Amino acid sequence: MVQKNGSQRVNRFGFIINIAFWRSLLLGLLFATLGALILSYQAPTNYIVNLQLNDVAPSDIIAPDPISYASAIETKQEQERVKNAIDIFYTPPDPKIARAQVARLRQIFDYLDTVRADEYSLLPQKAAWVRAIPDLSLSDILIDQVLITPDQQWDATKQEALAILDQVMRTEIRESQVNSTRRQLPNRVALDTPEQQTAIIVGITEDLIRPNTFPDLARTTEEQRLATEKVPPVTIQIAKNELIVSAGQLIQPIDLEKLAALGLQQPPYNWLSDLLAPTLLIFLTTSLIAAYLRQYAPHIITDIKRFVLLGVLLLVFLVAAKLIIPHEAIGVYSYPIAALTMLIAVLIDVQLAFFITAILAIWAGYMATENWLRVVLYLILSGWTGALALNKERSVSTLIWAGLYVISVNIFVIFIFALNDTKLDMPINLQAVITAGALNGVFSAGTALIGLISIGQMLDITTTMQLADLARPTHPLLRQLLLNAPGTYHHSLMVSNLAEQAAERIGADALLVRVMAYYHDIGKIQRPYFFVENQPQGVNVHEKLDPKVSAQIIISHVTDGLDLAKKHRLPSAIRAGISQHHGTTLVKFFYYQAVKEANEKGTQVNEDNFHYPGPRPQSKENGILMLADVTESVVRALKPTSVDEIYEIVQKMIAEKLETGQLNQCDLTIADIHKIREAFVDILQGVHHPRIKYPDPVKPTGSVDDKGEQGAAPLPVNNPKKPSPNAPPSLAAPPPPISQPAKLIRRE
């Protein structure tokens, strides 16, 4: 057994089943699944080959269409060429190395001085000691010369060797320059130095020459990176019918790239990048949309019509993005994302439009083959402009202006991108991109206009453009109302003014309630003279009818109005105003009259026959319409002469609707009721303010009037009216008979 409670059900085990939650969850999963399929879908193309690297081409492959594309292979080769052209940077000569080598030479000379000064060792022993020095590789002849050189010449040799080593080590010596530097040592020795001493100096010094500068890898890498970044993409132009691969040719990487660019090569399918990644992205963003709706717009989740519409619009624009964005760079700028933004802002929710725009821009950036960040920024700014350009009126002219704003922002953003973009060659490519941005605004406004008209009619969602069209006095129903029931027509105009002002003060939809007021009494077209506002003075057809029949005729204007509304395809919001503006109110005048007659006859009266069918007002706008309708009718019937009387009547009518529970199902608060009452009083006191009564004109004695009769006092008027059947008994008492002469009253 399942018990129903609104949108929830309680099963036999006591668990609460939230229908709206599960319904929205299933719809969300369906949307995410369809979105993942769309985003991961790869359109089939006319693949004619499935070649791999180093395969042999079975036949000549000809380009079917001309194409221009940026070659990744050629671009990489050009980057490598530029990178290799960068010379290796070296560090400055290290003075520590020079000082260390000079110090080492001094140590060697000190050691040689000690060996030379040893008087007790023989020459072979001394030569062995010199040969053991690790940093020297002297020949035996040079060792002997070092040992037998006279002291004076030896001292000069040492000074010259130290000076030469100091001088050489101050210069830049790379690893590759060590040998050449050593070969140049003889040229650095003083020219007046004997040949034997020169040989000793060169032999000792050359072994101490070391590199003192080394490659600066960090700087070299950075310079290579900067140079490669400046390399523009290499564009390859392929003409129609150009030979791509000859028969029998080995397939090279550049050939595979050309075939892929032409759409002639079957790309390898990657489950991770082609299926899993887009699926995860769609499910993640769908979860974010669901969280936003639950936290900030829960009414959209419960409104199945708008909830489904949101999903359908997103899927449609996702398909459009899949067709436009991945295939043509310039086409990205013509993608009309602002159309989606404007449709959501008008049909669903303004704040939601900004959030959805960002989500769709992210999807589009994911599909973009290059410059994904630019695509995201461009689409977000374009879409947000479309939403911000819409005002409360949201008419056709508003959409046109929104399209112009979108064009302006698109072109401005494109110029920002072009300021530092070497890919846009002036003026051809830039002009093409600007043209695409301008067409974006045109497509957005046109798509939004067509979408609003078609979607509003198909899903019965009331739009401001529909309301503006229905508000035209030339509408067939309003024309019939004016011609057949002029009193009701003017009553509807007055009710519309009251309702519109009240709606503006409480933040309700003023245009909607105004149009509802225009059509709320169209059912009176069928029997106009059964309603007091259309009856000639002194004529009341209800005097000869049974109270029950009169009540049914009065009540039938609601059902007749609904029939006319369906016939003329009025939106459901207008039909709701027709059915709810009386709620389930009791037609008191005829009910009390029927009760009185029944008491005299001793019979019973079924009260249900005297109630309007309802339902009671379900929204703020319908609640305002009910209050405006009854207030205007009573004030017009009683003709108050002061603001206090108007205030008392308005207060009494509102209190009566509150006491009978007619406003229990709409969202009006006590503060709203207070503002509505003040709005009614402000409008009504301007219409029913006291009039100035002028005295009757006095004709000269003996004068003849228009009919050729002498002037005489007007005849007294004694023609009491039957009270309005729509007014409560306490306020519908007939005015006292007029016994005094009629006077001319001027309406200010």
Image (tube, grey):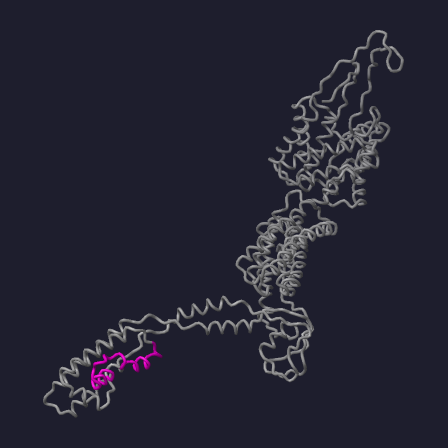
Q: Quadrant of the C terminus?
A: top right
Q: Is residue 201 above or below residue 95?
A: below
Q: Nearer the viewer, residue 7 or 35?
A: 35
- Location of residue 431 (image quadrant): bottom right
Seen at 13% across and 92% down, the residue is 122
> As drawn, which residue projects farthest toward the left?
120
Q: Position of residue 62 (x, y in %)?
A: 68, 76
Q: Nearer the viewer, residue 414 or 511?
A: 414
The answer to whether one can see residue 22 in this image is: no
Is 426 on the left-hand or right-hand side of 710?
A: left
Seen at 32% across and 76% down, the residue is 173
Q: Is residue 369 above or below residue 300?
A: below
Q: Position of residue 554 (x, y in %)?
A: 80, 34
Q: Is residue 721 above or below residue 49?
A: above
Main SS type for the magenta part? helix
What's the magenta region? 174-203
